[in-house]
Image (cartoon, grey):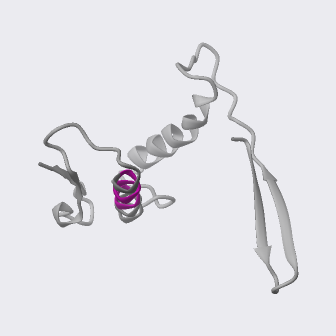
Amino acid sequence: PTSARIVRCKSRTELEEESVAYPLPTPVRGFSVNFPHSEGFLYEVQAVERCLAAGQTEAPEWPLNESLVLAHIMDEYRSQVGVAYPPGVTSVHTSHVLESGSKAKRAKLTT
């Protein structure tokens, strides 16, 4: 998607709408993508490159805790709709986030 519609409830009877458009990035010359519109991942790649260059282990725009929250939401979603991981893999465990500061933070798939 390249646009979003935001609807806010101002009151019980009044809504406020806003449309926000964001274009897909223009790939650099010679860059190709495997799937249509997957060039949108270029934003993530650029964020990772900036973090690595700055010596950061996570992006301030999307910290590790947000990734873990999303993983748990997706676990619950898959559970509710009946989608399962391959045999032996069950979920992401937040108890395995061990280190902080400049050391790498990590989550571990549990079996």
Instruction: Give the magenta part as a residue range.
Output: 71-78
Using the rendered view, name the quadrant where residue 19 is placed: bottom right
Tell me if residue 91 comes above or below residue 2 in the rendering: below
Who's the residue at 57% across and 41% down the image? 43
Left-right relation of 97 to 81 = left
Q: Which residue is nearer to you in this view: 64 or 69?
A: 69
Who's the residue at 18% across and 44% down the image? 89
Who's the residue at 41% across and 56% down the image? 77
Using the rendered view, name the quadrant where residue 22 is placed: top right
Q: Position of residue 75 (x, y in %)?
A: 34, 55
Tell me if residue 62 comes above or below residue 28 in the rendering: below
Q: Position of residue 9 (x, y in %)?
A: 78, 78
Who's the residue at 58% across and 18% down the image? 31
Tell me if residue 86 comes above or below residue 73 in the rendering: above
| Predominant secondary structure, magenta span | helix
Q: Position of residue 78 (x, y in %)?
A: 37, 51
Q: Which residue is nearer to you in this view: 61 or 91?
A: 91
**Magenta span has 72?**
yes
Q: Residue furthest bottom?
A: 11
Left-right relation of 36 to 111 = right
**Magenta span has 62?**
no
